[in-house]
Image (cartoon, coloured by chain):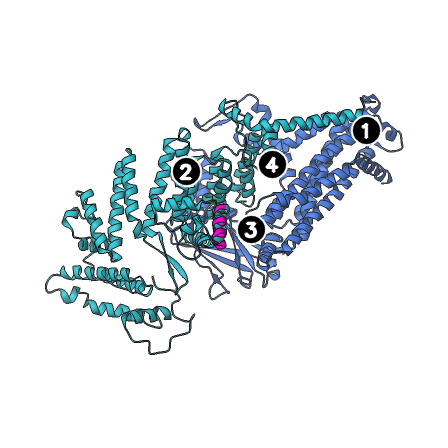
Amino acid sequence: MNPRLKKFLLVALAAVLLAGVSQVQDALNHDRETLGLTRAQPLENAPPVLAFTTVALGGFRGLISNLLWARAADLQEEDKFFEMAQLADWITKLEPHYTQVWIFEAWNMGWNISVKFKDFADRWRWVRRGMELLRDDALRYNPDEILLYRELAWFFQDKMGKNTDDASLYYKRQWAGEMARVFGNKPANLDELANPVSEDQKARARLLRVEFKMDPRFMKEVNERYGPLEWRLPEAHAIYWAAVGLQKAADYPARVNQKDLITLRRVIYQSMLLSFQRGRLETDPFSKSFEFGPNLDIIPKVNEAYERNLDEDDIYTEDIQRAHRYFLMQAVYALYVNNRIPEAGQWFKYLGEKYPNKALLGDPDSLPGRLTLDQFAVASVQEDVNDTSHDRVKSAVEGLLATSYRNLALDQDDRATGLKRLALKIYQNYTNKIPKGREEAMGLGPFEVINKEVLSRLLDPERGFPPQARAVLRTKLGLPAESAPAKAEGTPAQDTLPR
Amino acid sequence: MQRLLAIAWLTWKAAVRFRLFLVIAVLLLASVVALPLLIEDDGTARGFTQILLTYTLTVITGLLGLSTLWLACGMLARDIEECQIQLVAVKPVARWQIWLGKWLGIMSLNAALLAISGASVYALLQWRASRLPAEEQTTLRTQVLVARGSLKPENLDRDIDSETDRLLEDRLKQNPGARADLQEVRRQLREQVKAQYQLVPPSTIREWAINLGLTRHFLRDQPLQLRIKFNAADRSPSGTFVGLWQVGVPGKTQFRQFPPMSLAPDTFHEFDIPPNLFDENGVLTISFGNANNTSLLFPLEDGIEVLYREGGFGLNYARGLGIIFCWMALLAAVGLTAASFLSFPVAAFLSLGVLTMAFSSGTLANVVSEGTIMNYNAETGVTGRSVADVVFVPFFRVALDVINLAGGFSPIDKLSSGRSIPWGELGAAFSQIVLLLGGITGLIGIVIFQRRELATAQGTQ
C-alpha cells in the first residue's frame, strides 16, 4: 500500500475511534461511579488545562500539593503573603475534590492572613478572597458538599457579621456596597429579581446569579421562611447559604452526616438572632453613614427557629433554652423601646408562660409573674446602673433622652417616644426610692429641667447636632427656627451625630 | 588567554549547534511573558510585582541552573566519551586551559541568557508599573521597586552579657554549694535579662533610639518606613493589639504621633514616617505605648527597624542578578568536575544529587540541631538514636557549613521585598561562591582532569 495512503487511513481511524470514545465517556463515568471502580471522580466544570493536569499528573498530584502546602506554610511563617493566593489556587486545584483543602485555605485567608494587615482595605481583600474561593471555585467542583456551604455561611456570620474583628464594620460597609449594585441603596425587592421584567431588572438578576452565585427565587423562599431579611447585611447571606446547604442535604440524604446538618441549622438560628439584634440598616443622612438597628419584624420567625431547635436537639437543650430566654428578654425590651407596647406585652406574657421560674434579671425575685412590663424595661437598663448612684442614673436618663432626640431627628418617631418614656420611668423609679428628707441631696431635679438641658445642648450650634439635624428637630418639636445664622456645612463643632 | 577564549568559543559553537542556546532563551522569554498571565496575585499592584519578581527570577534561576549543570556535564563527559577531546588535547593547550575554557564558555552563555531574561523582566516590571495610577506607583516605587537599607537600634549584646554575668555571680554567691549546669543557668538568666529589654508591660511606654549615623546627611527630607514586629503571650478576641506610636521627641525634634493602630502579633508591619524627625545628631527616637492588658515583646533582632531608600531598583536588581550568576558559576564548576572523571549520565546524576542536598539544607539543619538522623517522637518526647549518627551528624554539619557559604544569600527575597543588596554582599557572594567554593571545586576538577587518561575512555562510536 502507498505509505502516504496508509498514514492517512491510520489518522482517519484514530479520529473515528476518538469520536467513538467521546460518545461513551459519559456512560463510562457513570459506570465507574455506580460500580465503585474508582475513588477519583471525574472533574466536572473544570477548565481544560486543569482537567488535563489532574489526569496527567495522576498520583503525583498528592506529592506536588504536599510540596506546595509546605511552601505555603513556610511563607506564612515568614509573613510573605503575596504568594498565598496563587498557592491556595494551585493546592485546591490539584485536589479539587478534597473538601478540607478548600475549607482550610479559605479559612486561612479569611481569618489568619487577613488579620495580619493593619489596613482594613487589605484585610477585606483577603476575607473576600477566602469567601470567593469557596463560593466561586469550591462549590463549582463540589456542588453537593454540605460542609462547604456551612463554611461559606460561617464567613458571613462570623467574619463579617460579628464585631470581633476591628474591621468588621468596614467589611459590612463593603458588602453593603457590593449588594447596592444589585438592590440599590434600598431594601431588596426580590420579586422584581425573581421575575425580572425591565432590562435593568434583568441585568441585576443576572449579576446576582453570575457574580454572586445566588438564585433570586431561592432568596425569596429564604426571605419568606426566615425573614424579612436585610439582604445588604451579611446575616442574610449566612442564612441563605446555610439554607442552600440544607436543601442539598435534602436532595442527597444518603451522603449527609447528621452533625453537619446541626451546624447548618445552628448557623441559621444564630444568624437570625443577629438579624434581629441589628439586622436593620438605618442611614444617617447628616453624617452620610449608616447604622444598625433591630429588625423587630423577624421576632416571630426567630422564636419559631428556637422552638424548632429545641425540638430537634436533645443534647444542648439547656443551652438552647437559656439562649431562647435571653432572646425573648431582648425582644421585649427592643419592642418596648421602639414604642410597640402591645407586642412587647404579648411577648412578655409569652416569656412568663414559657419560663415562669427563671429570674429575668440579676435579682432572684425578678420572676416574670412579679414584674410588670414597665418594671422589666426599666430594670433592664438599671441592671447596669446602680440604682442608688445619683450620677449614673442621671447619666442614663440624659443618655436616653439624647438618643430619643437623635432618633426623632432621624424620623424614628416611635423609638424616640419609647426611649423618652423609658428615661421617664427610670427617673421616676429612682426618685421614688429616695428616702424622705434626702430629696435635695440625692434628687436629680425636675425631669423637665434635665430634658431641657439635654435638648439645649443638642441644639447648641457649637457643640450640638449638625445644622440639618437641628432644623429637623426644631420643626418636629414645634420650636422656632434658630435665630443666629447657621454655620456653613463642614464647620460645625461635630460632623456627626453624637452617639 | 587566547587558548582559553578559543575553548570558550568552541563551547559556544557547540551550544548553538545543539540549539541549546536558542531553546533556553525561548524558554526563559516564554516564562517571562507567560507567568504574568498565569499567576494569581493578592489583588494589589505591590503583591503582583512581588510575585512576578519572585516567580520569574526563580524560574530563570531554576532553568539556567539545570541547563548549566546539564551543559557542564555534557560538554566535557561527552567530548571524552566520543573521543573528541583527544583532538583538542593533542593541541598545545594545557588540560587546565581546556577545563577553564569550557567553564568560561558556559559562564559566558549564562551571562548572555541571564542578561536577556533579566532585562526582559526588568522591562516588564517598569512597563507594568508605569501603567498604574499615580498613588499605586508611589507605593510600588517606595516599597518594592527600590533598594531600601535598614537601621536597627544599638546592639545590646554586650550590656546583656555583662548584666547576665553580674546576676550569675550574685546567684552563685547566694548559693555557693548549689550544683547546677552553669551553662544552662547562664542561658536562662540571659533570656531573663534580654526580656527586660524586649518587654513592654501594659500601660507603659518604651523608647528606642536609632542612630542614623552618616546616612542622616542623605536622609534630609526623605520619608522613612518603620518596620515592627511584636509577640504577645495572650490572644485577643480580635486577634490584634492596640499600640500608640510616636516618632520624634516633643520639644526637641519634630515629632509625629500616630493614631492608635490595631496590629496583629507575630507578623511584620510597615508604616511610613514623615521626614526629618531625627535630631541634629541623627538619632531617631521611637516610642511605643502599650494600651493593652497584656505585655508585648519586641524581639531585639527584628522587632524594630527603620528602612530608608538607599538606592534605585535598577542597580539593586543588577546586583541580585550578579549573585544568581555566582550560583551558576558554582554549578558549572560542579558539573565540569563531575564530568572530569565520570560518564555523562553518572556525572549528571551526581551533580543533581549535590544540588538536591543543597536544597535539603533544612533537613540537614534539623539533623545537626537534634544531633541524630532519627525522628523526634512528639508524643513521648524522646529522640531516637542511631549508630549512624557518628558518621552522618559530623558529615551533615560540614555539608551545612559548605552549603551555607553559597546558600546564605537570598537575592530574590530581597528584591521582592525592596531591600538593598549592598555591593559588599555581592562581593561576599563572589568571594565565597565563585572564588572559594568554585575555586576549590574547580581545582579538584582540574587536577582530576589533568591526571585522567583520555585514551582509555569508552568511545561511544
Residue at image location 56% in from the left, 42% down from the top: A86
The residue closer to the viewer here, B30 or B3, is: B30
Type of amino acid under label 4: Pro
Instruction: Check disc 4 and report its element: helix, strand or loop.
Output: helix
When the figure is inspected, residue A168 is found, relative to residue B90, above or below; the finding is below
Q: Which residue is mark 4?
A: A48
Q: Main secondary structure of the magenta part?
A: helix
Where does the image place residue B114, in percent across and percent down from the top left? 72, 43
Residue at image location 22% in from the left, 59% down from the top: A422
Instruction: Look at the image and say whether residue A208 sits in the magenta stretch.
Output: yes
Identify the magenta region.
A198-209
Q: CA distance from mark 3 to mark 4?
A: 28 Å
The residue closer to the viewer here, B185 or B68, is: B68
Q: CA distance from mark 1 to mark 3?
A: 51 Å
Number of callouts: 4
Q: Which residue is mark 3?
A: B44
Which badge, 1 or 3, is on the more N-terminal residue?
3
